[in-house]
Image (spheres, helix red, strand yellow):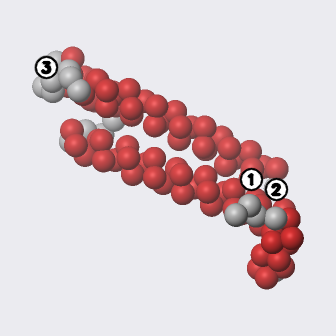
Amino acid sequence: MPITEKFMKKIAEDAGVSIDELTTSGLLAFLREKRRKIMFEIIEILDRYDITSPKELERKINDGTIAEHPTWEDVILLENLESAIVLIDEDIKAIQKSS
């Protein structure tokens, strides 16, 4: 069910905030939750290998402590997840700056 403008106005009114405040709060909550889920995924990977960073995982692969396959896939995944965190942080800062 699409959320109508009328419904948004009702929610904003019920919450005692403007539609802009409601939208801003909703976007920030969404981004923070997405960031939290990504961080959890990063922590799971780091814990799996008992490491603290993707660089440490690369080092363990290179020195033969950990097998290359499928570990390189996790290195790539960690790098992509960290990039996603950066983008989310930029979006959060932009929203906070504009509000």
Vertical arrangement, residue 53 with respect to residue 26, above or below = above
- Graded by Cα atoms within 10 Å as few (under 14), some (14 to 19) or many (20 or more), the crowding at tag 2 reads few
Which numbered circle lies on residue 96?
Answer: 1
Q: Residue furthest top?
A: 62
- Work out whether residue 46 or residue 41 is closer to the camera in this orientation and state it: 41
Q: Secondary structure at mark 2?
A: loop
Q: Residue 99: which disc?
A: 2
Badge 1 marks a residue whose secondary structure is: helix
Name the residue located 81 percent from the left edge and 69 percent from the top edge. Answer: 8
Q: Secondary structure at mark 3?
A: loop
Q: Within the image, what quadrant is residue 55 found in?
A: top left
Q: Are marks 2 and 3 in contact (CB under 8 Å)?
A: no
Question: Residue beneath label 3, please?
Answer: 64
Measured from the top left, where is residue 27 in percent x and y? Answer: 69, 56
Between the C-alphas of marks 2 and 3, the distance is 50 Å
Q: Quadrant of residue 22?
A: bottom right
Residue 35 in percent (x, y) is at 52, 50
**Mark 3 or mark 1: whose residue is earlier in sequence:** 3
What amino acid is labelled 1 in the image?
Gln
Q: Quadrant of the N terminus?
A: bottom right
Q: Residues within 10 Å of mark 1 (few under 14, many from 20)?
A: few
Q: What amino acid does circle 3 point to?
A: Gly
Circle number at residue 71: none
Report the number of numbered marks: 3
Image coordinates for residue 10, horizontal then vertical, percent: 83, 77
Confirm or deny contact between disc 3 and disc 1 (CB under 8 A): no
